[in-house]
Image (cartoon, grey):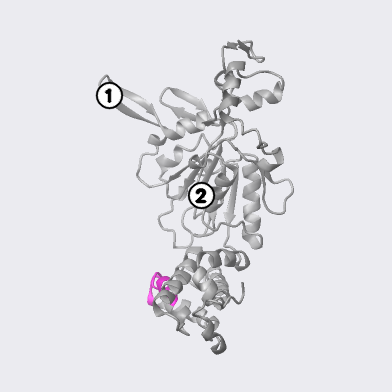
Amino acid sequence: MITCKNCGHQEPHYLGDHLQQAHGMTASEYLELYPDAPTMSARLMDEFKKRFTAPRRQHPPALTDLTIHFGDMKNLRFQVNAGVPPEVCLPLPPHYRLPRTGDLSTDVKHALISLKFGRSMYIWGLPGSGKDALFHAWSARTRTPAIIRQTKPGTDIQAWFFSRSFNQEGTFWEEGEILKALRDGYLLPDGTRVPYMLLITDFDRADRAQAEHVRLITDSIQGRVDGPQGTFHVLAGTRIVATANTSGAGDSRGRMISANPIDASIMDRFERAYMFRWMEWVDEEPIVRAKFPTLTSRVPKIFTKMGKVTKALRDAIMEEKLHGEFSHRGVCAILGHAQDILEVVGDNVPDDLMQMAARPWLDKLPDAETRQDAQNIMDPHLKGGLIAEGDKKHIKEGSLVEGL
């Protein structure tokens, strides 16, 4: 029998469930208090070792190999949950890179600090500023189990937590995936419960009733979730993150009209709130170069032009001189269309490739006047061809790699 040093309760094989239910703590937290105390029987430990110990000639990774070092902050490190399978984590976005310069780098560092200490967060900012991508990458790289839910006005968020179901014997309450995740975490074979991250996207689209469902789980003091059979405490270490395009006060720019104001008392329960801004081109360029290899090999000068266009458009948008958005998705729309065009024109690269490629983004703008304003901002940076006459003979072989 295994005896709990907190209260004297005994279990035949594993103490973890008792610790969670009776004391609200995980086995790892219990071992911090009682380092030499057993949490599982010798028989269960032997079975675990047989199934999960590495082959004799391989050495288990050192503790330092189970950490990820973000940025230039020496103590901003995260334990990797090596036993958590990748399929229960969020996927790593293709070609993801942490921003190293500019405002967004500072924004991301603050968010990572709050992730390290398990703070509930409200992240808001312009479309395409990498709000959701950061938490996808963090979940994937640290092997943190995660659930993502998008807020859709009018839908029943209560079903995330519990719902009424029925069978041959009648109706019954069924616990939802999120309630189970917040309360129980992800159970490893050794009995350890790894806390989940819950990522709620487009939270500023929530109506009043939907927003109320996250009131308690974001509260740093209460930390609980209401279920059909009563109230359950959220597993310690669970991370709650909501992302949105607005600050919770509703649309202030006339371009996020589906955003709703969020009750100030709910916003106050998020322990941290950060605004994400757009990425600097020095960080964005390596990402788009990796995404569009044909452009990188055939017309690398297009990225220099794209960088100047991106800065000019975003400056105009922030100064309210252009009524539109130019996110990373907008950059990819232009460069993606440029790459598509190259695939069909063959060896002769059009001198006006950038002007042609801009159409998918320009045509999204709301009216002719705004499209003309955007064109006027872009035109000074599009002068000149992308390929010098002396270099055109190299295009077929794909040997032009200037700027790599």
Q: Residue at x 28, y 26 (%)?
A: 166
The answer to which image quadrant residue 389 occupies is: bottom right
Closer to the camera in the image, 333 or 361: 333
User: Circle 1 sits on which residue?
Assistant: 167
Closer to the camera in the image, 110 or 254: 110
* Residue 323 on image: x %, y %: 46, 70
- Camera sees residue 383: no
Three-letter amino acid code of the residue under disc 2: Thr
Q: Residue at x 56, y 51 (%)?
A: 134
Label 2 secondary element: strand
The answer to which image quadrant residue 218 occupies is: top right
Q: CA distance from mark 2 to mark 1?
A: 37 Å
Circle 2 Cα neighbour tier, 10 Å, few/some/many (<14 / 14–19 / ≥20): many
In the rendered view of the protein, which quadrant contains the N terminus?
A: top right
Q: Residue at x 51, y 78 (%)?
A: 397
The tag on residue 210 is none
The segment highlighted magenta reads 357-368
- Magenta span has 86? no
Three-letter amino acid code of the residue under disc 1: Asn
Residue that extends furthest to the right in the rendered view of this protein: 74
Residue that extends furthest to the front in the rendered view of this protein: 57
* Residue 359 on image: x %, y %: 41, 75
The tag on residue 243 is 2
172 sits left or right of 32 in the view: left
* Residue 55 on image: x %, y %: 62, 34
Label 1 secondary element: strand
Closer to the camera in the image, 49 or 12: 49
